[in-house]
Amino acid sequence: MKALYTGSFDPITYGHLDIIEKSSNIFDTVTVGIIVNPNKTSLFTLEERMETVKNLVKEYPNVDVDCFQGLLADYVNSEGFGAVIRGLRGISDLSYETQMAYMNDKLFDQGVETVFLLSDHAHSFISSSMVKEVASLGGSIDQLVPEEVKIKVLEKYNK
Ligand code: COA
């Protein structure tokens, strides 16, 4: 089964890496699909995000990295993914994620499923926005992102 784990990854955090590791143990292959999201202003360019994610997933032989824009379902159907993974950090993610899953279910080819994986409790509070806010204000992000991500985030804020 070929699975897709998608998101903005601006930047990738320990929370995302936890879901990637869990997915790589469950599915034959996992593609981390970085979205070019016109509704979000990114701190990192698509190329920067691709490079960072590639470096961090190279220890997993069945994980690769790609990018897409437009409708998620078009990308999923055209690439032949059988599952789309979403990480749940807790009950607060469930409402939005359920709505999106039902909508996507109408758009995905037959047999494609949204699969929810529960984030590790230790990462349940992390979001990319929080990483950026804390870093921009001079707080420590050591517990939130790997060292190489931390360096790149701090560079962006001239810290
Ligand atoms: N650990 C840490 N943080 C996590 C996380 C985890 N396991 N899971 C989600 N997050 C955070 C992200 O860091 C992100 O934080 P931010 O908002 O502060 O940047 C937030 O949760 C949202 O995550 P993400 O999954 O990256 O959402 P997104 O909005 O960037 O992208 C898509 C979600 C790509 C699935 C959605 O926008 C999409 O499908 N877009 C394509 C257009 C489309 O098809 N629309 C119709 C959908 S029905």
Image (cartoon, grey):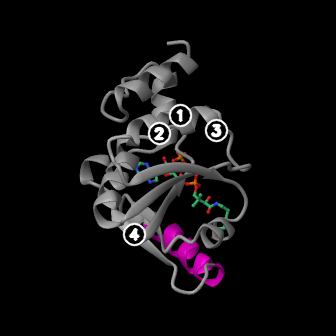
Q: Which mark is residue 116?
A: 4
Residue at image location 65% in from the left, 33% down from the top: 45
Residue 130: tell me if it is visible: no
As drawn, is 35 to the left or to the right of 116?
right
Q: Residue tagged by mark 1?
A: 51
Q: Which mark is residue 46?
A: 3
Q: Position of residue 53 (x, y in %)?
A: 47, 39
Amino acid on which the number 1 mark rests in the picture: Glu
Marks 3/4: CA–CA distance: 25 Å
| Other-residue count near label 3 (Cα within 10 Å), few / some / many at <14 / 14–19 / ≥20 | some
Q: Quadrant of residue 2?
A: bottom left
Q: Give the number of callouts.
A: 4
Q: Which residues are magenta?
A: 94-107
Amino acid on which the number 4 mark rests in the picture: Phe
Q: Residue tagged by mark 2?
A: 54
Frontmost residue, 72 versus 2: 2
Q: Earlier in the sequence, mark 3 or mark 1?
A: 3
